[in-house]
Image (cartoon, rainbow, N blue to C red):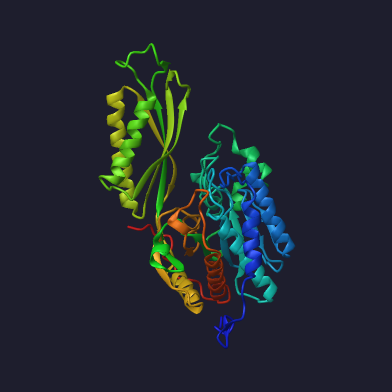
Amino acid sequence: MSDQVLERDGQLTLDIDPDRLLRRITELARIGADQATGGITREGFSAADRQARTYLMQQARAAGLLPSVDAAGNIVIRTAAAESGDQVLMMGSHLDTVVNGGRLDGAYGVLAALEVVQTFTESGLKPVHEPVAVAFANEEGALFPQPFWGSMAIAGRLASLPKDPRDHHGRPLSEALRQAGGDLDALGSACWPPGSITAYLELHIEQGPVLERSGSRIGVVEAITGRTVLTVEVRGTAGHSGTSPMEGRHDAMTTAARIVLAAEHLARDRRLCRVMTVGRVDPYPNTPNTIAGTVRLTVDLRDTSVWRMAGAEEALRRMLQTIEAATGTEIEVVAETRSDPVSTSPGLCAAIEAGADGLGLPHERLPSGAGHDAQVVADIAPVGMIFVPSLGGISHVPQEDTAPEDLLAGARVLLRTALRVACTDHTPPAGHSRPVD
């Protein structure tokens, strides 16, 4: 595509509608909002998540676009002129949140992708590659502990998904997925074959402090962290808290406490991986006068090196064996999720930088410390990620925020990058799915 489409006499000839984008961000943030805390809870496949999905599809239809739900529950928004068999430029993120999370994580990327697709349609442009917006289902895994559910289905990782997925309370996914418009028995139909997506772009808040500290307005993501989520079940012996002597107890809770500290030690003191976090602990029977008989907890391990991740996991498993022997409890470890770190497409990084340069926005390259759907889509297509600054560098909390001017700047860079990719026959070079050493 000629740069004349992007600029004429120094002026941008195609732009997003800033008021429309900010309005949609505000409206979507009301769904799942907790007035007391200011946070948002839209766990994947929950009632609030379904409301958010309905809102997105209504906005897409009002824009003259064609939203649909695939078997995995992903919302795919295409243009009225879509033709099957053509390569597409896919853009998006997710609508679901963690419990008491923020208004921008995931949602911003989905609404910005919708804005870009709508801008394409309203402009009358005839791109080589159809722009498509997507809202991936259950990226966070907050209720159903299968994060990246939707993107894994699109990327064809069906063998990595559980056959009978259930939420943290043991309830099956099948009915919740059906209510969202999906079909657990037809997941194969959600897969996109390699080559069908010419590129995938994801716009996201940074969720960290790098851009704010440096003063850069745009982050160009070079690599996305890998993530392993381990579910650890500790089985001890329940008993009365007053009548059971300390000597001879097999307390699952104190064993779990040792595991929490072991994970902290491996990442903080031994520096075997970038971060390791125990974020969920479920004791049973969870009463004040009973020794816990069983505790289930999660260990979230992340690094941009696949080898460091493997080494840290092995070290943790060895420590758990030592703890098991010392406490007389039984410890079972199951890897619920594995996503390798990946590098993004060099061609898409260059396109993002060109888009930022055209707008006069200072930018820098950086890794992503959080996982994203992009690293899963990287199995089948080149991927690129754009970051905008997070105020205070915080995310997954009610205080998560980004300045409106930065939200608009990121969407404009997404639009410019999309124009360069969608309106050219050139496919960005590969190299996107290689695990980072």
Q: Nearer the viewer, residue 334 or 370?
A: 370
Q: In the displayed structure, does residue 308 sit left or right of residue 397?
A: left
- Count how many numbered circles sit on residues in the image: 0
Residue 54 in the image: x percent, y percent? 69, 51
Q: Residue at x 57, y 74 (%)?
A: 419
When asked about the image quadrant of residue 333, the answer is top left
Q: Is residue 195 left or right of residue 61?
A: left
Query: Residue reaching furthest left?
Result: 270
| Residue 215 vertical position relative to residue 359 in the rendered view, above or below | above
Relative height, residue 210 to residue 358 (above, below): above
State the residue at coordinates (57%, 63%). 90
Q: Position of residue 191 (x, y in %)?
A: 57, 54
Can you tell which quarter of the image residue 425 is in? bottom right
Q: Is residue 14 visible?
A: yes
Residue drawn at (66%, 65%), measured in percent from left and top? 20
32 and 322: which is toward the camera? 32
Image position of 350 with respect to 113: above or below:
below
* Residue closest to the far bottom: 9
Quarter in which the N terminus is drawn:
bottom right
Q: Give the farthest residue toward the front.
A: 36
Query: Residue 262, image x and y in percent?
Result: 31, 37
Q: Residue 409: where, in percent of width, then height?
A: 53, 69
Position of the C terminus, as image quadrant, is: bottom left
Residue 428 left/right relative to 172: left
- For residue 173, what is the image quadrant? top right
Q: Residue at x 52, y 47 (%)?
A: 140
Answer whether residue 182 is visible to the viewer in this image: no
